[in-house]
Image (spheres, rainbow, N blue to C red):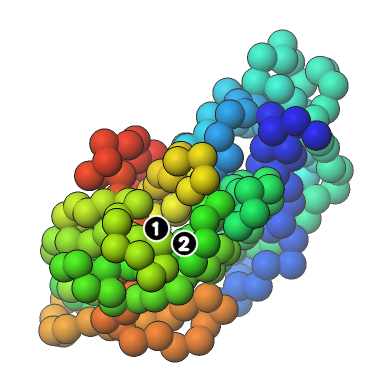
Amino acid sequence: MSRSRAAAAAAAAATLTLIGIGLSAPASAADPAQVSVVHGIPGATVDVYVNGKRTLDNFAPSTVAGPLSLPAGAYDLKVVAGDAPDGNAAAVVEANDVDVPAGANVSVVAHLDASGKPTLTPFVNDVSKVAAGQARLIVRHTAAAPAVDVRANQKVAFSGLTNPNEAKADLPAGTVSADVVLAGQSQPVIGPADVELKEGTATVVYAIGSATDKTLAVVAQTIDGLHSNPSAVPAGLGSGERGSGAGVPPYALVTGALGLLVLTAAGAKLATARR
């Protein structure tokens, strides 16, 4: 399969992975799902059709689509080449009667796995409220690269983050200086840069591309509306979480900010979707 076809398939499959994703809180059948799709595979532009209607047009790599507010239900999905005239073109990949659960807030990432093969990974976004004065930073390793260390002020704060895992923490709103290096090395592959975390938001940073091909970059997604009661403004870092939920010291996750800074310093493009 060509890279173009593989990327398109990954993008479509990403949407399909909504099936069976667990929710952090009960949702009624009337609650729409909030679905974002992150295109992290270089070199393939596609169109995505939902129930026969073009929903994503010329969906380019290094961009975020959505969030799309989709009523719970079954959907027919079809992905065609970006230069196809309409949805009657031959499908690169398609699926019918795809179940989208109610109330989910999900980002599905089409990306390269650690070995460089196209794949997709669904992430359920943590959109719980943050304390007054805080922001949430989530870093996701979705690049064809080995384990990385995240550094704060040139000191390793989080080591060994691997594809396709994430690290997250609630941090005081403000500016964080960070960079990313391959595990055990000292030369930054992303960053360094200062990253501003705005109060009441979740900033999700995806490392994408390939270390071997020297195409490492980041895509950023911002989710608003996480403000809570401002009556108490805590000091210091919040609790941290890595991967499937194992606890991680908060200071380690601060370095996750490195992901966002990476492209700022390198001058690469940040694709930002705001909710």
Q: Give me the C-alpha separation between circle 1 and circle 2.
A: 7 Å
User: Could you say which is closer to the camera, residue 126 or residue 194?
Assistant: 194
Kind of residue at disc 1: Val
Above or below — where is 148 with respect to 263?
Answer: below
Residue 12: x and y in percent read 71, 42
Residue 122 appearing in the image = yes
Sequence order check: which comes first, mark 1 or mark 2?
2
> What residue does disc 2 label?
140
Say whether residue 270 is left or right of residue 246. Answer: left
Q: Which mark is residue 175?
A: none
How many numbered discs sit on the rendered protein? Answer: 2
Residue density around tag 1, few if under 14, some if 14–19, many if 20 or more, within 10 Å: many
The secondary structure type at the circle numbered 2 is strand
Residue density around tag 2, few if under 14, some if 14–19, many if 20 or more, within 10 Å: many
Q: Residue at x 44, y 88 (%)?
A: 247
> What residue does disc 1 label?
204
User: Could you say which is closer to the camera, residue 131 or residue 83?
Assistant: 83
Above or below — where is 159 with respect to 61?
Answer: below
Q: Residue at x 23, y 82 (%)?
A: 237
Residue 144: x and y in percent read 56, 52
Residue 72 appearing in the image = no
The secondary structure type at the circle numbered 1 is strand
Kind of residue at disc 2: Arg
Q: Quadrant of the N terminus?
A: top right
Q: Residue furthest top?
A: 85
Residue 24: x and y in percent read 55, 77
Say whether residue 163 is left or right of residue 177. Answer: right
